[in-house]
Image (cartoon, helix red, strand yellow):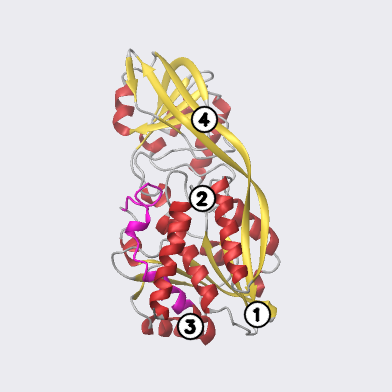
Amino acid sequence: MNQANDYVEKSRSYLQMLCETIPGRCVGSEGNRQATRYFRQTLESLGWETRSAAFNAMDWITNGASLTAGGEAFSVHSSPYALGCNTEASLLQAGSLSELESLSMQDRIVLLHGELAAEQLMPKNFVFYNPEHHQKIIAALEAGKPAALICATGYNPELAGGVYPFPLIEDGDFDIPSVYTTEEEGKRLLALTGNKVKLVSEATRIPGTGYNVTARKGKNPGKRIVVTAHIDAKKGTPGAIDNATGVAVLLLLAEMMKDYQGEPVIELAAFNGEDYYAVPGQMLYISENHQHFNQISLNINIDGAGYHEGGSAYSLFGLPERLTQEAHAVFRDAHGFWEGPQWPQGDHSIFVQYGCPAIALTSEWFLQHLHSQRITHTPADQPGIVNPARMPEIAAAIRDLILKI
């Protein structure tokens, strides 16, 4: 077997381990901890100096939810990380912020629909992106003290991935029990406004621990090239392109550069929390590096790579002219790369916010279908949608760029 085929087989092996052998990679879960141990042990076997950094993280389980009203049953789902409930109360509804702020909702069950439920609300303590109108909705709900919420949502791939309906609220720091349902079920419920409804959500929060894993090679820690991919996945999805393929690229790159002895330090970082409400791994990395981002000459982030249709896409963020030219040259000479538009939904945005040049690598298909895809965050994100040849191509291009600069 030649080396190229060997790397393809290793890609398949990494995907099988991360998506099938390990039982889910949601932050705070045992599967997530298995994934980070596997990543660290593989890097150590290749001679990299590794470090694990721990943080507190809540796992969460649900045995389902039910809603009955007027002798009818409605299909609802427990909101991720929400508290459970077993309550019966009058149903109120609000479709706009003004309607919500005018409600006397204490101890009632409130149906959120329309413009209130048009896009997933940012977690209350999420620092990277938190629009004012999201904050006002959360503030009105917390001030109103309803017994529970029913959220009728549609389809919002930019913030919630491909799932339908999407959970309007996914926030372990928000303590009002909530469930979510489709727009169609929401319309049925509107007719029952003012009536008693019974809502049960068998959800439980579980204290847990997670880890970031980093690995380094090189002589000068004052100059770093940081290559990143998030290792976590949403609960209920194998997380193949989101983001087992990114982790596989890091592992392949580690093998391709196992003999590296250059001056800049190459840092491979498996971030843990990109698909989790509190982004704890990213926040930990920032706290550890907030005075050292000036050491980072380039970040390369892999997320959403390897889809079987089309090639790979690269997007450039704030690169100086010389580095821009070198990046274009490397990707032009590599197989199957296309320059895509800038997109913010990834860990490269952390580095951009701290003034570091960054390159984001993903699937050409993903960028072309960013506003309509129905795969990420769903059970459909499984290894069968991946072209395993894409990962070695991406890893080799990253290696060539690092060695060139």
Packing grade of label 2 (10 A; few <14, some 14-19, many >=20) is many
Name which residue type carries label 4: Ala
Residue at 58 percent across and 57 percent down: it is: 36
Nearest to the observer: residue 122 or residue 309: 309
Q: Horizontal placement of 393 versus 105: left or right?
A: left
Residue indicated by mark 4:
203
Other-residue count near label 1 (Cα within 10 Å), few / some / many at <14 / 14–19 / ≥20: some
Q: Which residues are magenta?
A: 373-398
Q: Where does the image place residue 315, in percent across and percent down from the top left?
A: 42, 71
Where does residue 63 sit, x and y in percent of width and height? 47, 29
Q: Which mark is residue 400?
A: 3
Marks 4 and 1, how far apart in space? 47 Å
The residue that mark 1 highlights is: 218
Number of numbered callouts drawn: 4
Callout 3 amino acid = Asp
> Split into 4 quadrants, where in the image is the C terminus?
bottom right
Q: Earlier in the sequence, mark 4 or mark 2?
A: 2
Which amino acid is tagged 1? Gly
Mark 1 vs 3, N-terminal side = 1
Label 2 belongs to which residue?
25
Residue at image position (51%, 35%) is: 61
Asked whether residue 74 is drawn in magenta, I would say no
